[in-house]
Image (cartoon, helix red, strand yellow):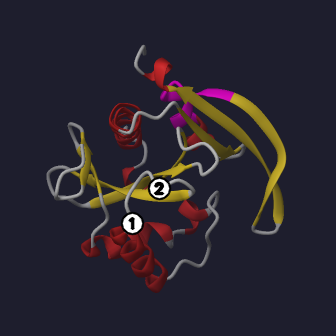
């Protein structure tokens, strides 16, 4: 569904689109927030980090095996960036993608992430014709767990001390949903 303006999906309140330079400040503000980065891989995020990331995403295209592609989540009415979501097209099996997402704190608890991810899953399973979407989340991240379960994703595993994050070994839950399950919901 991508068109020349870099739009991949639109819902009632949101547009899922390619990043643009005017997103850098908003992106930096939520990425630099310690509450947002608590369960993420980054810390001490700088404005320069945000600008470099946005520029890289502007030059990148989705669905490249072995890479992540970050989609901007913006309000339909104002085009204001409120978060991002991403897919990692697996290099070994490109019909399977991994999901990631982040939302600015002031927009959490409003259903925006659910709406954005429903649009993204429609795009991933419909337009990109992917077979399966997986997601990993820190077992302490209750909000992400709720988002994934509300999408209808199934918890398929509890991975003990699965990765090192900020100096500690972290347990993760693995979630998944098949294309056939998404379209029969």
**Residue 145: % across, % down:** 60, 37
Q: Which residues are magenta?
A: 146-155
Quarter of the image with the C terminus is top left
Q: Which mark is residue 64?
A: 2
Which residue sits at x=37%, y=76%? 55
- Residue 147 covered by magenta stretch: yes
Mark in front: 1 vs 2: 2
Classed neighbour count for the residue bearing mark 1: other residues with Cα under 10 Å, few (<14), some (14–19), many (≥20): some
Q: Which sits in the foreground, 71 or 73?
A: 71
* Occupied quadrant, residue 30: bottom left
- Residue 167 appears in the figure: yes
Task: Answer left or right for 82 relative to 99.
Answer: left
Q: Residue at x 30, y 60 (%)?
A: 18
Q: Position of residue 178 (x, y in %)?
A: 53, 25
Tell me, yes or no, if residue 104 can be seen here.
Answer: no
Q: Nearer the viewer, residue 95 or 177?
A: 95
**Local crowd size for mark 2, using a 10 Å CA cut-off: few (<14), some (14–19), many (≥20):** some
SS class, disc 1: loop
Residue at mark 1? 60
Residue at the bottom extreme? Answer: 48
């Amino acid at each position: 569904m991508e068109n020349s303006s870099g739009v991949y999906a639109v819902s009632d309140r949101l547009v899922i689109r390619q990043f643009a330079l005017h997103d850098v400040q908003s992106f930096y503000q939520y990425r630099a927030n310690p509450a947002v980065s608590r369960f993420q891989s980054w810390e001490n995020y700088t404005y320069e980090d945000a600008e470099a990331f946005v520029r890289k995403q502007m030059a990148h295209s989705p669905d490249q095996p072995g890479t992540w592609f970050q989609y901007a989540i913006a309000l339909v009415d104002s085009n204001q960036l409120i978060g991002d979501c991403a897919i990692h097209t697996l290099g070994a099996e490109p019909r399977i993608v991994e999901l990631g997402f982040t939302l600015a704190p002031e927009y959490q608890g409003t259903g925006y992430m659910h709406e954005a991810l429903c649009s993204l899953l429609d795009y991933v399973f419909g337009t990109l014709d992917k077979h399966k979407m997986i997601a990993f989340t820190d077992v302490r991240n209750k909000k992400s767990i709720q988002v994934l379960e509300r999408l209808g994703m199934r918890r398929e595993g509890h991975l003990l001390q699965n990765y090192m994050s900020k100096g500690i070994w972290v347990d993760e839950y693995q979630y998944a949903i098949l294309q056939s399950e998404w379209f029969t919901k």
